Amino acid sequence: MWESWGSNMVVKVKWFYHPEETKLGKRQSDGKNALYQSCHEDENDVQTISHKCQVVGREHYEQMTRSKKYQDRQDLYYLAGTYDPT
């Protein structure tokens, strides 16, 4: 995160995609909270961030969701693979 020339706060982000946003679409193996990482990076105004989320490996995700503490979390996702949007 840094301050731009125009005094706006900027953040560099790496994009993740929901399965339905990929060219192949959602696959049978994709669970409810699957995300695909990409090499796509952007610099955006900090104000465009709507919320934070947590992305973990699938095994860790399954362990976490077995716990009552994490069962209803809407901000917990697992890494299902990689995706090249180009």
Image (spheres, rainbow, N blue to C red):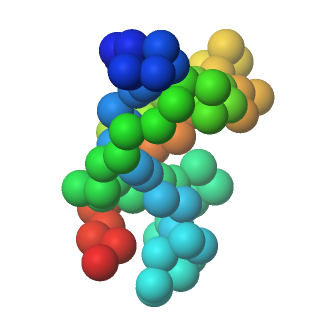
Residue 10 x/y as whole percent: 43, 25
- For the point 59% across and 49% down, the residue is 33
Question: Considering only vertical position in the picture, is 70 above or below 56?
Answer: above
Residue 26 x/y as whole percent: 56, 76
Question: Considering only vertical position in the picture, is 86 above or below 78?
Answer: below
Residue 43 x/y as whole percent: 37, 39
- For the point 23% across and 56% down, the residue is 39
Question: Considering only vertical position in the picture, is 49 above or below 82?
Answer: above
Q: Specify the farthest residue to the front.
A: 6
Q: Specify the farthest residue to the bottom.
A: 24
- For the point 62% across and 34% down, the residue is 48
Can residue 24 be spotted in the picture?
yes
Q: Specify the farthest residue to the right.
A: 72
Can residue 59 be spotted in the picture?
no
Q: How many marks?
A: 0
- For the point 47% across and 75% down, the residue is 22
Q: Quadrant of the N terminus?
A: top left
Image quadrant of residue 56?
top left
Residue closer to the observer: 18 or 64: 18
